[in-house]
Amino acid sequence: MALYLEFTRSATPAEVSAAGSAELASRWTRLTAGQLFPASVGYATSDGLRSTASRVGIAPAASCAAALDPSVAAILRRHGCRTVLRATYLDPSGTLVTTVAVAVMSSPRAAQQAGATVTSDLPKAGVRALTFPGTTAGQFTDAQRGWFQATPQGTYLLFYAAGYADGRPGTTADIIGPPDLGQGVMERVVSALSGGKPPCQRKDIRC
């Protein structure tokens, strides 16, 4: 009887919380590449308009050393960086480009600490450009990056690096367009990693 009651009782608040933490930490393994990095992403521009970013391509999972600038990779390795997922997007004009990344960390605390260090010490470094030769974004390399962001979310540390698709260096004076694109796509990825049903209502989670 006691065993029956144990298997049929409702989950306790502590169990629900633990299931939620585990679900979020493992979500990157259960989302498809297209769910994490959709083919198109709507975002708001600084002038209040709506725009849509188009995905150029998605990279296979990479090591932290391969996907990040060396100085940033060194910080993340100290905090337990496991792998990095990346995709590149263009704005509707084909002029602006961003690479967005998800670094999978060992814990939420590790993501917070690594993010704080990167933001304060290395504001002009982060994810390396994910280039797709033969596409409109084919000239977007590390030298074209001019805008960077690192944002922790649970066990993840998200990055974007943005710039121009035509080969202009990242030091070009425009300060609005590329960050709008990068931030908009990154926020969509954050939503994929943090939103959805309560953990005990998900078919792939047992409470």
Image (cartoon, rainbow, N blue to C red):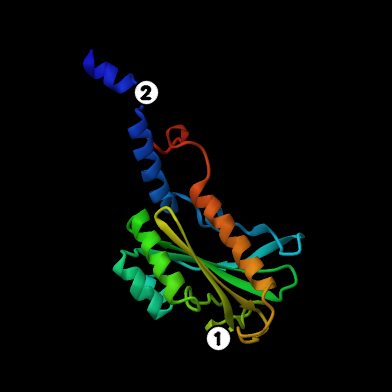
Residue at the spot 76% in from the left edge and 64% down from the top edge: 47
How dense is the environment of label 2, judged by Cα within 10 Å: few (below 14), some, or many (20 and up)?
A: few
Return the residue at label 1: 143
- Residue 82 lies, in percent from the top left, at 34, 63
User: Quarter of the image holding residue 22?
Assistant: top left
Q: Which residue is mark 2?
A: 10
Residue 122 sits in which quadrant? bottom left
Q: Is residue 191 left or right of residue 29?
A: right
- Number of marks present in the image shown: 2
Seen in the image, is 22 located left or right of residue 194?
left
Which residue in the rendered view is the most extreme toward the top?
1
Measuring from the top left, give residue 206's x and y in whole percent: 37, 34
Residue occupying image coordinates x 71% and y 63%: 45
* Badge 1 or badge 2: first in the primary sequence: 2
Q: Answer with left or right where residue 163 lies relative to residue 78.
A: right
> Please, is residue 77 above or below residue 186 in the view?
below
